[in-house]
Image (tube, rainbow, N blue to C red):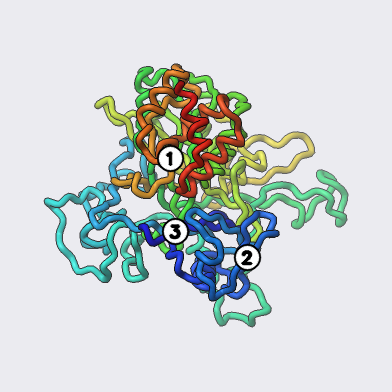
Amino acid sequence: MDQTIIVRVVSDAGRNRIEIDPRSTCEELKEIISAKIGIPARKIKLYADQGYRRPYKGTDSSSLKKAGFTNGAQVFVPAKNAKMQDIINVPKKADDEEEKIDTSTKAGGNPDEEGKEVPDGFEKKCSCGPTDKCLMCLGVTKDNFQDVDYKCHCVGSQKCPNCKDENLIQDVKHIPFEHHLSELRAKCKKKHTPDQRCQDCIPLVDISYKYKPGCTSHKPYPEGMCNKCIPEACILNRQKYRHVDYISILNYPELQKFVDYWLGGHCMEQRVAWLYGYYSEDPNYPEGVRANIEAVYDPPQIGEMNGFQILQDEKEVYVDMVATSLGLERVGWIYTSLNHESFLTPKEIREIARMQERFAIDHPEGVKVPKFVTIVVKPKGDSGESGLDCYMVSDQCQALERDNILEVSEDHTKLITREPEKNEMIANVIQEGKTVKEFDPEFFIVSLSNGQPIDAKEYSILKNYDFLAMNRQFQPNKNDAKDYINKHKSDSSTEKFANFQFLLYIIEKLDIDTVCALAEKIGKGEEVEDFIVELVESLAS
């Protein structure tokens, strides 16, 4: 670890974290970036600022150290055709494991797997190595683990092409979105010349169920219409792909406190919080995407027995600024629910669709795609415990909600379409060849896997989760800050303040610029300047 540095790459495709030897050349760094975003290395230019005005010094043959790269350095790459986000994981110790815990509820989980018995483990189907665990090792312990032949000698979070076994995804209902696109592109090979296009290789377009006004071929509707302006019918289909494949919970202690706070009120008031983290490649799926959760933030809210209301939050912009300085972004939300009748209610599905639309990101092919994940906390049986279920909704559902096709349903088991207003045309919803006004919401549910790394602190940005969360019954005060500072006084300057809730608290005591400067040092893993340390520690006096 002492001989490597972290380089944070920012491009049109998103953020990437790369671990590399500082003695490597700039050309070698470009080759790694090229493999991750799909841009030829010769076309990659490295800048130290977002405006692309300050290029890193040195030639391709210069070492990274000579070119000015330090641990946590941020690199901006102008790359319009960048393909996807990725991460090269920091190597863990040989005894590190990724623990896949059973967090699902009996009432929740995967609608595609309802009624299907889940075996204890799939040890013969995986190839993650004897010191690691993957999605197919769920429930495997040292007592029932069976030795198998491995194709590689990777340990911990390290992955190579040999350990990406196709058996890992043979039972998965939703394939990664980028892999789905690759399969479509593969179908059109040799079917036509390079300058032609077919249904499999045409550029992506956003799904739309809106009426297209302004057609000059006829009078305005209802006096006239044609195939060009009529809304496209929505043919209900289960989505084959998903934009996020796996959720890794790096801040399990903090998430547990969120759940405990809800349970402490006897589940009478539902709670909601934003999830902050980053996206990375998931080696268990071909071209898969993993959402890594590092922090939660409770916005101002009103909780009720059957739901919650998020209030206007004047501090939200500051929360996002601190998260960005840490190298994090808002990747999802978590909320509690007492719904036992279905996986998700129609109201929940519509709200998730709105959130995915709100936080959709730009895809290199020019469309918006969702990567905003949902974690639902529900009671787990009669034991007093709770479980987590992770979802997204399909692109089709998101488009129906965005284009105002759906309506409030009194039936908690059905989604319904609204009636068109006078002189209005809306899209029809078709199920099994028939136009329907109500339908099963499970058509739209996309289930995600989740798990918790055992030694998340080894490679997470945030190290501490022992400060009171904002916007709960007991607000943090000066004494809490004093206790926290004294508790971590002997820690390194990077680790002692690596607490998201503490950083949010000191915004009011200092100023947002100082806190962001502190957060940026934490995100880069660099020592904090003495004057900032003294300024923060003065809050304990």
Residue 81's disc number: 2
SS at mark 1 in the image: helix
Q: Quadrant of residue 403?
A: top right
Residue 443 shows up from this direction: no
Q: Are marks 2 and 3 in contact (CB under 8 Å)?
A: no
Question: Vertically, is 531 above or below 233?
Answer: above
Q: Nearer the viewer, residue 176 or 216?
A: 176
Q: CA distance from mark 2 to mark 1?
A: 39 Å
Chain-order first, disc 3 or disc 1: 3
Q: Which amino acid is tagged 2?
A: Asn
**Residue at the spot of label 3:** 5
Q: Residue at x 50, y 71 (%)?
A: 25
Q: What is the CA distance from the residue labelled 2 to the residue labelled 3?
A: 27 Å
Q: Which residue is mark 1?
A: 493
Q: Earlier in the sequence, mark 2 or mark 1?
A: 2
Residue 31 position within the rendered picture, expressed as x and y whole percent measured from the top left: 51, 71
Q: Of label 2 and label 3, which has the lower sequence position?
A: 3
- The residue shown at (51%, 24%) is 308
| Quadrant in which the N terminus is drawn | bottom left
How many numbered discs? 3
Mark 3 secondary-structure assignment: strand
Residue at 28 percent of width and 47 percent of height: 99
- For the residue marked with disc 1, what is the amino acid? Ser
Q: Nearer the viewer, residue 248 or 196?
A: 248
Residue 110 in the figure: left or right of residue 532? left
Residue 168 x, y percent position in the rendering: 32, 61
